[in-house]
Structures are given as C-alpha cells and as structure tokens.
Image (cartoon, rainbow, N blue to C red):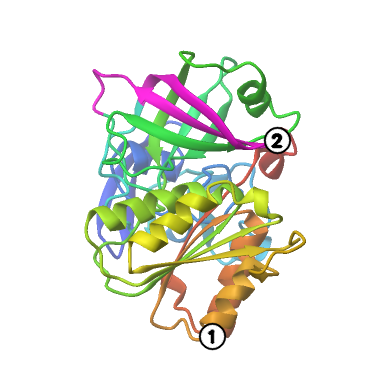
Amino acid sequence: MSYQITIQPAGRVYAAEGDDTLLGAAIRNGVGLPYGCKDGACGSCKSKLLEGAVVHGNHQAKALSAEEEAAGFVLTCCATPQTDCTLEARTVPGAGEFPVLKLPTRVVALTKPAADVAVLTMQLAANQNFQFRAGQYVEFILRDGARRSYSMANAPHSLPGQIELHIRHMPGGKFTDHVFGALKEKDILRMEGPFGSFFLREDSDKPIVLLASGTGFAPIKAIIERARHIGSTRPMVLYWGARRQGDLYLNDWAAQAAAEWPVLTYVPVLSEPDAGWAGRTGFVHHAVMQDLPDLSAHQVYACGAPIMVESAQKDFITQCRLPLDEFYADAFTSEADKHGGA
C-alpha cells in the first residue's frame, strides 16, 4: 500500500510505502524534515497532522503527550500513515541533501581522553562517497541488528575520508562495553548515515550560543569546525557543562579554538566543581541566562543530556525571549532513555 504525504507550507510531496513511518519515507525520498532520535524519545520531529490518519508506534509521553496527540500532533518518526496525509512541518534545507548509505568502517584510532570517554576515528570505505553535514549522526548496526547512534565530531573537511566519534561508556551497555573492552584498531564496524537535522543554519547572520553537556560536545565541535572553515564572522559563545573538570575531556581543544579564532568565546561550567576550580559553576544553561538574559536576536544549538536540552529550551524561550524556531537541539537519548535497556 502506498500513501501520498504532503508537507505544508513547503508543498513537498512524497510517497510512503508499506510500513514506512512518515519520517522514514521522507528520509528515503530526500525530504528534509526536522528530527533527532528516530525512536519517539526526543520530540524533535513533532508536527501537526492537518489531514489523514496515522497509527503511532511506541513513544514517550515527554515527546508527545496524550493531550498533544488529541490536538492533532504526531511524531513523524513513529507515525505510520493509514491514508494519504497532509502535515504542517518546517522543512530543513539540507537535511535530505546527502544520500543515506550503509557501509563498513574501520577503526584507525581509539583514544581515551577521560576514563569513561573514547574518541574513535573511523576510516570510511574508499569506494563510497559518504557525505554529511557537520552535526549529523550515524547509526552503528550491531550483529543482532540493534542500532546505536553517535554524532560525528568533525566537519567533513577536517578529516577527509574519516569520521570522529565521542563515545561515553554506559556500564552494561551492549555497544559501549564492547568499545571499552574488546574494540581495537583495524576492527570493522557497519554503519548507516548520515541522519539528523542538527547542523549550522548558514543562511543566518545571528550571533550563536553553542550549548553542550558531556559528550554532547561532539556535534558542537563539528559545527565550530564548519563555521571556522567557511569563514563565518558570527559571534559564537560555547558553553560546555560537566560535573568535574576531568569530564571536559577536550577542554584544551576548546580553549585553543577560542584563543585562535576571535569570534569564538569558550565558557566551561562545572556542576560539581573540583577544589580550586575558579571558573563558572552550576547548571550550564543558567550560565547562558546570566550572561545573555535577552536571546531574542540569537540562535541556540544545544546538545547533551535530555534534561539539559529540555530545560534550556523551556527557560530560554519563556525567560530570555528566544524565538521558538531559533532553538536547534540534539538530545543524547541512550538506550536506557529510550527503552529502559542498555
């Protein structure tokens, strides 16, 4: 069975086949819809169903409440059309620009800048023209078919033919236990990508707030590399939050980038500061609010723990006048966040 899906106000039309979700069909057809986790956990893909009927798969109430569903909102990542449908959704220029590929990748470097953080450098297949936007993510396909998502921490130009990934160890996690236990250089992993609508909106000239917690720094790093590569002159402030100083696992990289590039300012923030820490403390998004109480003329790019992303979005919009459509986010939802598993 095939259904016609129309996206308004852009007027894009595509077909959903069989058990396709609205989002899955859009990705396959190169239609750029906003999304993050693809698992009904983050709410980034929430859209309004103007016409038609869908059936929702499993999703979290924080991503789509019963009241929102009753009001006609859907999560495109887990909504399967039952009829032709018309959606009201913002299209994201560039989100569907590059083809989604399945390909093998080889581990060429594995370092551990912190006890619970691994930085993987992966060599891409030479015969595959893998293209992506800085800030997007890939999914590793495990032997049992399970998938694990990680943002690429480099801009395409900075590691030609390679990608960099930052992986935090989740004890008991099927994939991260392997990364921190058995994975070694020259091992082959299968992946698919690129996915996601989290990347720099290059058609804007607004000043930028970059907000990261933990390994949410990975796609933020890629965005910084991209902005610097294209010669952006937009003022950028990077706020990176962690519990302790050692959790700022690439602190030297961030400090050096800010020292070398005048448009970038770096503000590290610790919630459980070490003795002798002279920098900022508390919740990282509160530091932004203290420094920039009026965000009405800014763009915000936030990535990290779901609670940080959700709190920042709510507080920036309600208290700092940030326009709703200028908050771009990628919440790092773990398997435990999604399904109660690792």
Main secondary structure found in the magenta portion: strand
The one of 190 and 268 positioned closer to us in this rendering: 268
Mark 1 vs mark 2, CA separation in Å: 35 Å
Q: Quadrant of residue 15?
A: top left
Q: Is residue 300 left or right of residue 100?
A: right
The one of 339 and 194 positioned closer to us in this rendering: 194
- Up-down relation of residue 70 to residue 60 (above or below): below
Residue position marked by numbered label 1 in the rendering: 293
Residue position marked by numbered label 2 in the rendering: 170
Please name the amino acid that badge 1 sits on: Pro
Q: Residue at x 46, y 74 (%)?
A: 324
Decide: few, some or many residues near mark 2? Use Cα within 10 Å; few <14, some 14-19, many ≥20.
some
Q: Residue at x 43, y 31 (%)?
A: 18
Q: Secondary structure at mark 1?
A: loop
Please name the amino acid that badge 2 sits on: Met
Q: Quadrant of residue 262?
A: bottom left
Q: Residue at x 51, y 43 (%)?
A: 38
Residue 144 point in image, percent of width and height? 60, 16
Residue 151 point in image, percent of width and height? 47, 42
Q: Residue at x 40, y 76 (%)?
A: 298
Q: Secondary structure at mark 2?
A: loop
Query: Is residue 89 at all visible to an observer of this figure?
Result: no
Q: Is residue 221 magenta?
A: no
Residue 317 point in image, percent of width and height? 53, 78
- Quadrant (top left/top right/bottom left/bottom right) for the C terminus: top right
Query: Is residue 31 at all visible to an observer of this figure?
Result: yes
Q: Which residues are magenta?
A: 102-129
Residue 80 point in image, percent of width and height? 49, 42
- Quadrant (top left/top right/bottom left/bottom right) for the N terminus: top left
Decide: few, some or many residues near mark 1? Use Cα within 10 Å; few <14, some 14-19, many ≥20.
some
